[in-house]
Image (cartoon, rainbow, N blue to C red):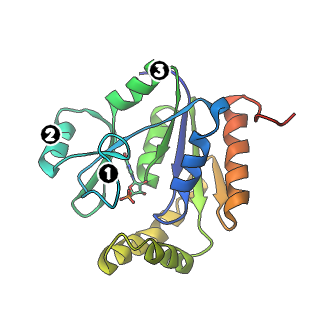
Amino acid sequence: MRGGKLIIFSAPSGSGKTTIVKHLLNQPELNLAFSISATSRPRRGKEKHGEHYYFMTLSEFKRHIKDDDFLEWEEVYRDNFYGTLKKEVDRLWAEGKNVIFDIDVVGGLRIKKKFPDQTLAVFVKPPSVDELKIRLKKRSTESDDKINMRIAKASVELATAPQFDAVIKNYDLQTALDEAHKLVAEYIGVEIKGKK
Ligand code: 5GP
């Protein structure tokens, strides 16, 4: 495997990294494509197979682990497996794209370790764990139990921030979007459209 740049956005669930990743995907000069992960978790709301995730059963997921099909995988929450298929990154590189990932901190750091010379790993920091709780409740796509599980994990994840190449504080969304755009443009080596 080789090819374009790898841009990783990792953060506790509810930090706003998905919003940041979507914003970056809308910037044509960055030439980014989203790495669609595989997951064994159930579909949420309007999520589509092959767009947000490749949804699969737990046994399908485990078969892919056995067949060594993953670049990285994690049991992010109990019985909820998530992973990046090698084939997915190959597919996007073959299209000449830089690949952007929205993955958990362990997976993000694992990819960085595998491709140290072509990866920018960014950690998105929420204002506080309390604010995370508020955001997850507002999203109201999950039960209280699941939300509490995500909050418990958040503290552990926050401690990994120093291992990333950059940390973006998502206290004000527009500031975070601009900062992320600038950071990725610099890493890829392109100018932001409309700016000199
Ligand atoms: P969610 O269930 O909210 O979509 O995702 C839960 C967590 O799993 C998020 O932190 C998300 O970034 C992470 N995740 C999504 N895809 C992958 C993946 O391919 N690998 C890893 N390690 N984590 C992932």
Query: Of circles 3 and 2, which is in front?
Result: 3
Residue 146 rendering spot, x and y as whole percentages: 32, 73
Mark 1 Cβ inside 8 Å of ligand 1: yes
User: Disc number at residue 95?
Assistant: 3
Q: Which secondary structure, mark 1?
A: strand
User: In the rendered image, which residue does mark 2 sit on?
Assistant: 63
Amino acid type, callout 2: Arg
- The image position of residue 125, as x and y in percent, is 60, 63
Is the Cβ of the residue at disc 1 closer than 8 Å to that at disc 2? no
What residue is pinned by disc 1? 74
Name, please, the residue furthest toward the right.
196
- Judging depth in this view, the residue of 192 and 59 nearest the camera is 192
Query: Disc 3 and disc 2: Cα gap in Å?
Result: 27 Å
Pointer 1 or 3: first along the chain: 1
Please tell me the numbered disc located at residue 183. none
Q: Nearer the viewer, mark 1 or mark 3?
A: 3
